[in-house]
Image (cartoon, helix red, strand yellow):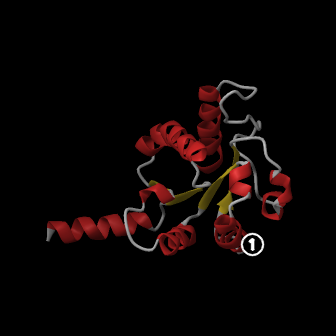
Amino acid sequence: MKDFAREISQLASSFDAENVFISYADVEADRKEIDKLLQALKPLRITNPRLRIWHRALISSGDVEQQVAAELEKANIIIPLLSADYLGDDRILSTDIPIMDRRLSQGQAEIAPVILKQCYWEALPLMLKEGVERLPDNHLRAVVGGETNEDEAFRSVAAAFKKRFL
């Protein structure tokens, strides 16, 4: 009976959870950056137990595209990690972006992109829509060798995330 009660409690708390989906290009350089972003966001997960962060590296087996689409449908906060590789990824452009666009248009999700590397992100119409605001709010780039310290850039992303969503 205790297990059942715990499961019901977890289910009930999931209804008002912040479900975050981090979308990134599946290339080595961007995979390294997601680890740094997750590390920067970790303190927020400790102080906000209902914060649930999901990304495609969490998939261990099964239909990857189906799981990605299902998680995108659950997310109320979507963080695309923008780079030239991201903008050139056919899967992202044909699958993820249309779902993000629809969920934003229907008011079901907020989009908060992070610019990982200089890229022509403005060419993606979704990124120019009303309500899409980059993180951090002072537009620091979270890149190695960028104009800012990388640790400070990711700290700024985490601080902007907290300010905007928590």
Q: Residues within 10 Å of mark 1 (few under 14, many from 20)?
A: some
Q: Is residue 35 above or below residue 102?
A: above
- Residue 101's place in the image compared with 151, above or below, is below
Three-letter code, disc 1: Ser
Q: Which residue lies furthest to the left in this view?
A: 1
Q: In which quarter of the image is residue 75?
A: bottom right
The answer to whether residue 112 is seen in the rendering is no
147 w.r.t. 99: above or below:
above
Q: Which residue lies furthest to the top in this view?
A: 149
Residue at 61% of width from left, 36% of height from top? 159
* Relative side of 10 to 145, left or right: left
Residue drawn at (36%, 69%) of the image: 11
Query: Disc 1 on helix, strand or loop?
Result: helix
**Quarter of the figure with the N terminus:** bottom left
Find disc 1 in the rendering and name its residue: 105
Residue lying at 37% horizontally and 62% vertically, measured from the top left: 60
Say left or right for 59 vs 132: left
Using residue 14 as the reference point, say whether residue 124 is left or right of it: right
Q: Position of residue 56 (x, y in %)?
A: 50, 59
